[in-house]
Amino acid sequence: MAGPVCNGTYGHHKSVSQGSLLVPCSDMSGIIASKGKNVSSWSKGQRVASIFNQTHQTGQIREKDMTSGLGLPLPGVLTEYRVFPADGLVAVPDYLSDEEMSCLPIAGVTAWTSMNWMQPLGKSISDSNTIVLFQGTGGVAINGLQIAKACGLKGKL
């Protein structure tokens, strides 16, 4: 059974429209096979991962950034090769495998944001009385429990 993105029914924001041709998926980790002449920030062979909203670089997401999501409305990453803007990638640390890194752009960031979006900058979420509840066993829940444990919080699944 195809999901909402693949069958064309995922209209989560009015700025996002879907054409008939779609390359799905938005999380990836890989290596740079080739780079543009004016790109100095990356090297051929360097390990990288994509960011989901290609134009969202800092701060609160804005409506215009919603039109730069990989997999919808932009072509996704379920392909052998993909062209990215230089600032649409992040470096992959050596200690993470491609599989581990490709779980972070959406699931990891969603879990982190759900736990931290109302915290003042620099304030720790660690509090021995705090219990974090994540429903489900998907990527967001698993990432959230790992973040909660790393912060010393009690987690429930």
Image: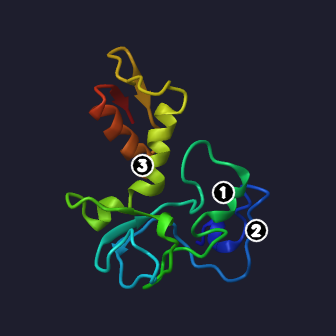
From the viewer's perspective, is 7 left or right of 56?
A: right
Percent across and percent down for residue 153 are 33, 25
Outermost residue, top side: 129
Image quarter in which the C terminus is found: top left
- Number of labels in the image equals 3
Outermost residue, right side: 14
Please give the residue where the numbered disc 2 appears in the rendered image. 17
From the viewer's perspective, is 97 left or right of 15?
A: left
Tag 1: Cα neighbours inside 10 Å, few (<14), some, or many (≥20)?
Answer: some
Res 101 → quadrant: bottom left
Q: Which amino acid does label 1 sit on?
A: Asp
Q: Which amino acid does label 3 sit on?
A: Gly
Percent across and percent down for residue 78 are 48, 78
Image quarter in which the N terminus is found: bottom right
Q: Which of marks 1 and 3 is nearer the N terminus?
A: 1
Q: Which mark is residue 108?
A: 3
Tag 2: Cα neighbours inside 10 Å, few (<14), some, or many (≥20)?
Answer: some
Classify 128 as above or below 32. Answer: above
> What is the CA distance from the residue labelled 1 to the residue labelled 3?
19 Å
Q: Which mark is residue 65?
A: 1
